Image (cartoon, rainbow, N blue to C red):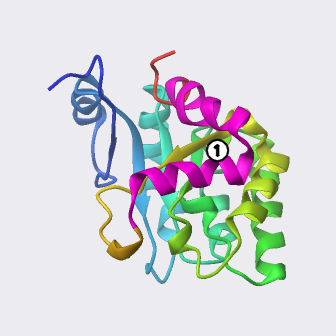
Amino acid sequence: ADPGRLRAVAVVDPGFDGAALAALHAGGARALRLNIKSVPDYSAFASGDWLSLFARAHALGWHAEVYVDAGRLPEIAPAFEPSPIAVVFDHFGNPGTRAQAVDATFAAVARLAGSRPVWAKLSAPYRLGGADPVALAARWLQAVGPERLVWGSDWPWTAFEEQHDYGRLREALDRWVGAARARAIVWDNAARLYGFA
């Protein structure tokens, strides 16, 4: 309705052709979203159809936003290696709570970041299974820098309803990264990522 002021992230079939993506782009879409939590096998995302979709999306300047099961980011990261598309890992990349899984997650992030921009969305700490969002934010700051972090409220809050209060969620970002960095993460970085800046 107002692509000059609003942006969207689209969940699409890998068969969406260039014209279909261009129509979404005209409406304000700027990214693909892969909701692959609970998908048992990620290997299809490294196949021809998906790689072709990533190429078409990248040609429009889009990124891929990815939500995975706890600890499974290292399984999906290689799927993006043949494409230059930027990747945003939602919910802190959901590395889980085991130190080995967290380390493997950030090792995969480092490999992927060597060939394209990698971002993290710091959102939904209640989806982390008890992992410490402050510690994870520090790892992301070290891995990709403050200019590649964005924040999300997780609205429309389809789970954990009792924990949702926009003010408290936004204030938590200040604790995770410091108030000085939080403004850039909420505003400036998001404006660049979604094509406003």
- Quadrant of residue 8 in the image? top left
* Front residue (pair 71, 130): 130
Q: Indicate whether 154 appears above or below 64.
A: below
Q: Is residue 79 visible?
A: yes
Over which residues does the magenta segment extend?
Answer: 164-191
* Front residue (pair 70, 123): 123
**Per the image, is 169 magenta?**
yes
Query: Seen in the image, is 96 located left or right of residue 25?
Result: right
Q: Residue at x 61, y 50 (%)?
A: 173
Quadrant that contains the N terminus: top left
The residue at which mark 1 appears reads as 119
* Front residue (pair 28, 45): 28
Q: Number of callouts in the render?
A: 1
Q: Is residue 117 visible?
A: no
* Front residue (pair 147, 51): 147
Q: Residue at x 50, y 24 (%)?
A: 191
Crowding at dot 1, Cα within 10 Å, few <14 / some 14-19 / many 20+, comes out as: many
Residue 66 rendering spot, x and y as whole percentages: 51, 57
**Per the image, is 155 magenta?**
no
Query: Seen in the image, is 67 located left or right of residue 83?
Result: left
Helix, strand or loop for disc 1:
strand
Query: Seen in the image, is 98 located left or right of residue 40?
Result: right
Query: Seen in the image, is 94 located left or right of residue 160?
Result: right
Q: Residue at x 66, y 46 (%)?
A: 174
Tell me which amino acid carries mark 1: Trp
Q: Residue furthest left?
A: 1
Residue 118 rendering spot, x and y as whole percentages: 67, 44
Residue 117 rendering spot, x and y as whole percentages: 68, 37
Q: Residue at x 72, y 81 (%)?
A: 97
Residue 71 rendering spot, x and y as whole percentages: 66, 77
Q: Main secondary structure of the magenta part?
A: helix
- Quadrant of residue 154 in the image? bottom left
